[in-house]
Amino acid sequence: MSRAKSNAKAIDLDPGYVRMYFEHQYDRIKKNEDQAMNISNVVFTITALMLTFGFNNQQLFGSTLILFLPLIIIIANVFAILYVRENTRWIKVHQIRAKLILETYTPELYSLDKENTAPPMKGIVGRSATQYLFHALFITIALILLFLFVMQLYSISII
């Protein structure tokens, strides 16, 4: 990550601006994480509501219209996965910017930060991976329900 170049302007830069830019990167990271979590929570809520109330009133919706509920669940969860993935990409960008600002303006802190990184997590899944897994689980449930509804619509017996 030694992309930083020594620059005469770098020495003259006010440390307050450097600190502000560094803090801004981590503020953006927090906001991106919060946005991804909020999108996931909204999609989880919509999915739970559809699973709870939509499929309990199958006669109210009709046999053809009930096929759209699993499709809505699938589309919403795919959207959430794509959104979380995009946010994860932006989080990495902000982390790189913060590391570059450390490397450029405070090399001592950068080397300290580089030497004292957190050990890798063993057997623990991260937050975004957990979000992916839950969305994939709901997509799988919706696909199974869609399959069962199509089978029921065409009066095909599984057993």
Image: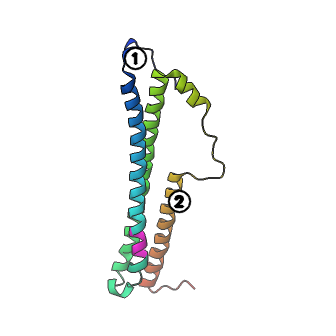
The type of residue carrying mark 1 is Ala
Q: Position of residue 46 (x, y in %)?
A: 38, 69
Q: Which residue is mark 2?
A: 133
- Does 140 appear above or below 1? below
Query: Which stretch appears magenta?
Result: 46-51
Q: In the rendered structure, are the residues bearing label 2 and label 1 in contact, judged by CB atoms less than 8 Å apart?
A: no
Residue found at the far front of this picture:
16
Q: Position of residue 136 (x, y in %)?
A: 50, 62
Instruction: Assign a secondary structure to mark 1.
Output: helix
The crowding category of the residue bearing disc 2, from other C-alpha atoms within 10 Å (few below 14, some 14 to 19, many at least 20), is: some
- Examine the rendering and report whether any part of residue 3 can be seen: no
Q: On the rendered structure, is 152 left or right of 68?
A: right
- Please name the residue shown 49% across and 24% down the image: 103
Quarter of the image containing the C terminus? Answer: bottom right
Q: On the rendered structure, is 17 left or right of 101?
A: left
State whether the magenta stretch is mostly helix, strand or loop.
helix
- Please name the residue shown 48% across and 30% down the image: 99
